[in-house]
Amino acid sequence: MNALEFDILLPAFLAGLLVLATHIPFGMRVLQRGVIFADLAVAQIAGLGVVIAGLLDLADQPLLVQLIAAGSALCGAALLAWIERNAAEVKEAYIGLTFVLAASLGILLMSRDVLKDLLVGQILWVNNTQLIGTAVLSAVLLIVWRSLHGSPSHLVFYALFALAITASVQLVGIYLVFASLIVPALATHRLPQRRMAFAFGIGISGYVIGLLLSVWLDLPAGVAIVWAMAVVGLSTAILKRPG
Amino acid sequence: MKKILLIISSLLFTLQAHAALNVFACEPEWAALTQELAGDKVSLYTATGALQDPHRIEARPSLIAQARRANLVVCTGAELEVAWLPVVLRESGNNTVLPGSDGYFEAAQFVTMLEVPTRLDRGEGDVHALGNPHIQTDPRNFLPVAEALGKRLAQLDPGHAAHYQQRLAAFNQQWRAAIAKWEAQAAPLKGVAVVVQHKGFPYLSHWLGLNEVAALEPKPGMEPGAAHLAQVLNTLQKQPARMVLRAAYQNERPSEWIVQHAHIAAVALPYTVGGSDNAKDLYGLFDDTIARLLAGLQ
């Protein structure tokens, strides 16, 4: 690898590490609660906030747009917490419906293709401002998470989760957010011990291998990482299966 | 349900003022050209906005209703609207605007196309067998298109033929003068090296003599690989570019990335009428395009 390629991959790799730092513990909790698609719903609601900010001609004030996105995501979090408290037995149905409604409203309102920008990876376009902003946010979220010993109330959990997703979707795209959240947690959910270490191993290997494949074979980076992480996760699950 | 929507929307539209011809323009630049050539003799509808990618738009009942009442459909052609226009025209049930009939006008047929592929492979992303369809970035292309469109308007609305002839002559004269003015203003841009976000500017580069040294998204509409980006940065080290160009409707992040890595200026071009506050008509479109390119040189 030459210096130029390293220069391109390093910010993308750092973005991946930041996403993993919050998404692996959150992903384990998401899996345990059975709210796998909550991230899609929250990301879509945050995206809806960005679309509305654009319609209000606020697109040239990035900080305000971020506040609106975070605010919308927190409203989404409150909705998810309410669903979990009041309709626990059919919560997946409500969460899926929330996702579809938010996505459809986005299409109804928007005049340009923001949705595709959110879905397809943008990990190679990461800039330093985004990295620093997300690093600060991730640190705050992790400190709050730790201080609650990983067992906050519904509302606090969804609020932390919503803020993490809002930042990470803009950083790496929704496919990678979903993979970072679910693959490490799912691949290690039967491990009796050192689950966290294995989960981070899978996540980090996924980003490293995916980014290297993107350089060597000139593949789109985001989707290459999703597949690399899935293959590493599946292999780990098979090799380390109990009994 | 669709029928009810159609009836309601056609009722709404009959409330509009009655002009001689109803024109359905696929893109804002053709609506603007029709306006120049026809003035108040037509009622115009534009199917896509300046901030939409004309390759992909959502099919809406209003599109079909508008196609149904159209006397003339004016589009770029060259497969730019292939994803939605054939469906809209078929659903409209309006035989007078089907491809091949007098009510169907394709601008690309009157222009010398660039980037016509010698080999066709959909694996290369959004490629067009008939060449690059973004012909509206070279003002010289509007002259033959205006000539043909003016004749077509006169043919469809013979009662006002003299009116169309007169406006066409006036447009021809004014537009040629404007081109001369833009070319004089744009003299410093000749030979300037630029990066393009996607290959949407061959006609503009051809006109002004811009030197496109790299494209960030080699397959339009697809995220590039890291190897390609390394190659772009490599090229830029050997052959520094002054600016990176993108259309107003495109995501700004690839441009921002190359601005940080290669320290060049980012220039967002209106790309069509309505793409920026100053691009209110065809003249404004090129006034603003040249002004933004010159600002990128600073």
Image (cartoon, coloured by chain):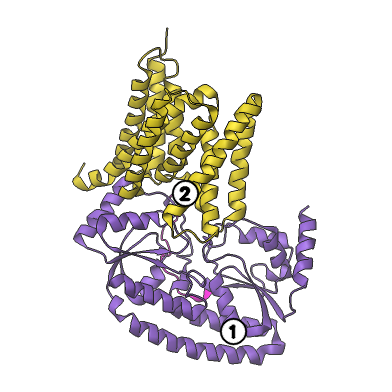
Q: For residue A131, which quarter of the picture?
A: top left
| Chain A, colour shown | yellow
Asked whether residue B216 is in view, the answer is no
Q: How far is mark 2 from mark 1, CA to CA?
A: 47 Å
- Give the residue at the far front of this rendering: A147
Residue type indicated by callout 1: Leu
In the image, A27 versus B6, the foreground residue is A27
Magenta stretch: dominant SS?
loop
Name the residue type under label 2.
Answer: Leu
Chain to which mark 2 belongs: A
Examine the structure image and report whether residue B277 is included in the region drawn in magenta: no
Q: Position of residue B294 (x, y in %)?
A: 33, 75
Q: Quadrant of residue A173?
A: top left
In x, y percent, where is residue B199? Answer: 40, 61
Location of residue A114 with respect to A32 vertically, above or below? below
Q: Which residue is mark 1?
A: B37
The dot on residue A67 is 2
Range covered by the magenta-colored residues: B109-123
Query: Looking at the image, is A58 positioned above or below residue B110?
Result: above
